[in-house]
Amino acid sequence: MDVNLARTFLMVAETGSFIDAARRMNVTQSTVSARIKGLEDLLGRPLFERSKNGAVLTAAGEQFQKHALALVRVWQHAQLEVSLSDQHRDHLAVGAPLALWDDFLLKWISWLRTNIPDIAVSASAGLAAVLTQRLVEGTLDLAIMYRPTQPPGFMIEHLFDEEFVLVTSVPPPQRRAAADYVFIDWGRDFHQDHAAAYPEYSNPALNFDLGPFAIDYLLSNECSGYFPIRLVRKHIARGRLRQSKRARKFVYPVYMVYPETHDEEDYEPILEGLRRHASRLVKQSGAPQTR
């Protein structure tokens, strides 16, 4: 299938309008209509309900949307790998939640560039469900995640356990108040565990889906929130943040996920470097590595 059909479909789904999609893609409206008609003929189902107000996905359109995204990602991945083949021996696409890049994976990427410079690296952040889907699609070679599901045909290997602690920038002897609390969204598991532990904070005044960037807010405002201990340890040591000793801690294992069938010669140095960085992180923090 022409990848332009998938791109056009996604643009109409995003804008909700054939006219706006044509404008965004710099093509005529008749071109957009013809592409969608051709796609619907290929699939044998209408993908949009048209009206004066625009275009809305049908049930078949909603089902096709994830496949269209996959088609576009696979094509983009293929273009990237082909373009890199002249300058690099191989290409590694790696993904992880935002929290794991700061103070961990970025250091590992630096090690990769120094020790295995002939491999090009594409790094991205994403939710676990998206990373898993990309692994299955083949547009991701390696993912590092909290509590991953194990897709068929993939290995999961434990690296270390991540401890989330409650910290505050409220100076003593003041006490933390509910109005000062900031909910940092660290993913589905944390969201569920936090809701069970703190039902009184189910509707916080401030909700951040910014990962480690939210630390800057705590440092600039008198408030409290949960963070991985490895990210706030230096601020605690400097007295800029205080850890609440009585508050509950949340611990989530971190795993790397990669295909069962892989080139041992190429993959093993990459994986071993990641293991060493995880071990170094554990030694620095004193946290458990094995379970």
Image: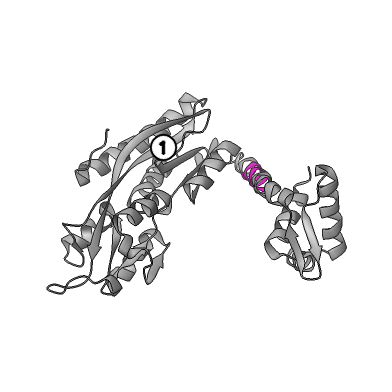
Q: Nearer the viewer, residue 27 or 90?
A: 27
Q: Amino acid at mark 1?
A: Met
Residue 212: x %, y % from top left: 36, 59
Quadrant where the C terminus sits is: top left
Relative to residue 262, is residue 209 drawn left or right? left
Q: Is residue 42 visible?
A: yes
Q: Is residue 68 visible?
A: no
At horizontal 85% and vertical 59% (from top left) the residue drawn is: 33
Residue 247 painted magenta = no
Dot 1 falls on a residue whose secondary structure is: strand
Mark 1 surroundings within 10 Å by alpha-carbon count, few (fewer than 14), some (14 through 19), many (20 or more): many
Q: Which residue is mark 1?
A: 256
At horizontal 23% and vertical 62% (from top left) the residue drawn is: 167
Residue 73 painted magenta = yes
At horizontal 47% and vertical 24% (from top left) the residue drawn is: 264
Q: Height in image: 142 above or below 105?
A: above
Q: Nearer the viewer, residue 192 or 173?
A: 192
Residue 53: x %, y % from top left: 77, 70
